Amino acid sequence: MAESGNRARRQPGNGRERFLPEQSLLELSDYLAMQRAIGNETRFRLLSMLVEQGPMTPTELEELLDVPGNTLHYHLDKLVDVGLIENRKRSEPDREGLYSYYRATSLGEGILTHGVRELIDEEWAALDAYSGD
């Protein structure tokens, strides 16, 4: 029922449907960039692996995906750029020293699990819950 209320509130704007609430933290172009990023098989596999198995180092990802290091880092950078994964550094050294690892963001998990349209609908539902409509 909330779904139909959300769709009814979407207004045409500049000849196009306004898909997102005015208060949205992201633009439609941001959501579409995320969708394009996981349209590549290597990036889809990377994101899937990070969502399913948790944070991993580039070396672990390279070995599991059997992707050359330079290719891997190219795809990791694309996923970081659109906010689907993040690169973190360990705060405490272990016997191997400090190292970098990658993990999926909540947006990364969301787009993999739900896709763009469902994430947008969830944003409308959150707006409704917050505004008390």
Image (spheres, rainbow, N blue to C red):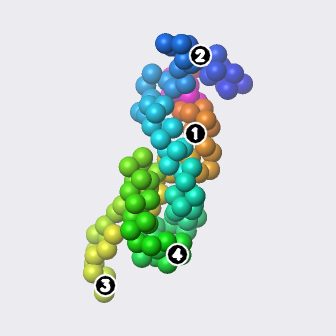
Secondary structure of the residue carrying numbered label 2: helix
Secondary structure of the residue carrying numbered label 1: helix
Of pointers 1 and 2, the one earlier in the residue sequence: 2
Residue drawn 45% across and 37% down?
30
Residue drawn 59% across and 16% down?
9
Q: CA distance from mark 2 to mark 4?
A: 47 Å
**Which mark, by number, is residue 96?**
3
Of pointers 2 and 3, the one earlier in the residue sequence: 2
Q: CA distance from mark 1 to mark 2?
A: 19 Å
Q: CA distance from mark 2 to mark 3?
A: 55 Å
Comparing labels 4 and 1, the label whose residue is closer to the camera: 4
**Which mark, by number, is residue 116?**
1
Q: CA distance from mark 4 to mark 1?
A: 29 Å
- As shown in the figure, which amino acid type bears the numbered disc 4? Asp
The residue wearing badge 2 is: 9
- As shown in the figure, which amino acid type bears the numbered disc 1? Val
Secondary structure of the residue carrying numbered label 3: loop
Q: Which residues are magenta?
A: 124-132
Graded by Cα atoms within 10 Å as few (under 14), some (14 to 19) or many (20 or more), the crowding at tag 4 reads few
